[in-house]
Amino acid sequence: VNVSSLAQLDPFPGFFAYASSKAALHLQTVVANAEGEPHGVRAFTLAPGVVDTPLHRALMPEGIAPVDGLSSTLTSAEVAKVIADIAAGKHDTRAGWILALPAPAAVSAVRRWIIEHPGGGVEILS
């Protein structure tokens, strides 16, 4: 399980290197899954939203998110539970995929942000 970030899907100014490195990490997941699959080895990219950690609190200013709710955070325990679920095989049908894990309050905010920013390189596929 490679732990990435939702920043690889929706980066914002100032996060070029961070978002790029997380996107590259997902490519490693895709290759590892393709190479491991014949041997029963699966690989996943877990992309959580903001996780409340001391480092995050020290580095991120309040109000950096463009939409109310996006700054909601996950706990490290919530992320760890999903990693345990992945290891237990609960997401095996999604091997090689990005498993996005936004904070609960951010799910509707992400949808709202997409609607309010048309033409911003984001499209909702039906």
Image (tube, helix red, strand yellow):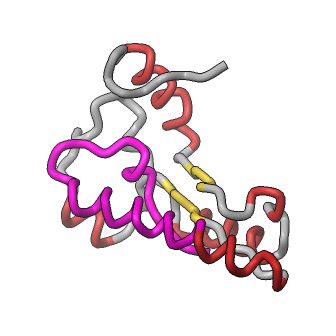
Say left or right for 29 vs 52: right
At horizontal 32% and vertical 23% (from top left) the residue drawn is 120
Is residue 36 shown above or below 45?
below
Q: Please state the horizontal and vertical placement of residue 64, each as a whole percent of the image.
A: 22, 41
In the figure, is residue 45 to the left or right of 71?
Answer: right
Q: Is residue 94 left or right of residue 54?
A: right
Considering the whole magenta stretch, tell me its main secondary structure: helix
Q: Position of residue 66 (x, y in %)?
A: 28, 31
The quadrant holding residue 34 is bottom right
Identity of the residue drawn at 31% across and 72% down: 54
**124 vs 91: above or below:** above
Instruction: Choose between 78 and 101: the one closer to the eye.
Output: 101
- Closer to us: 81 or 5: 5
Magenta stretch holds residue 46: no
Q: Residue at x 77, y 69 (%)?
A: 85
Figure check: 113 above or below 78: above
Q: Which residues are magenta?
A: 1-30
Say which quadrant the C terminus sits in: top right
Q: Quadrant of the N terminus?
A: bottom right
Tell me if residue 51 comes above or below residue 2 in the rendering.
Answer: above
Measured as percent of width and height from the top left, residue 75 is found at 52, 63
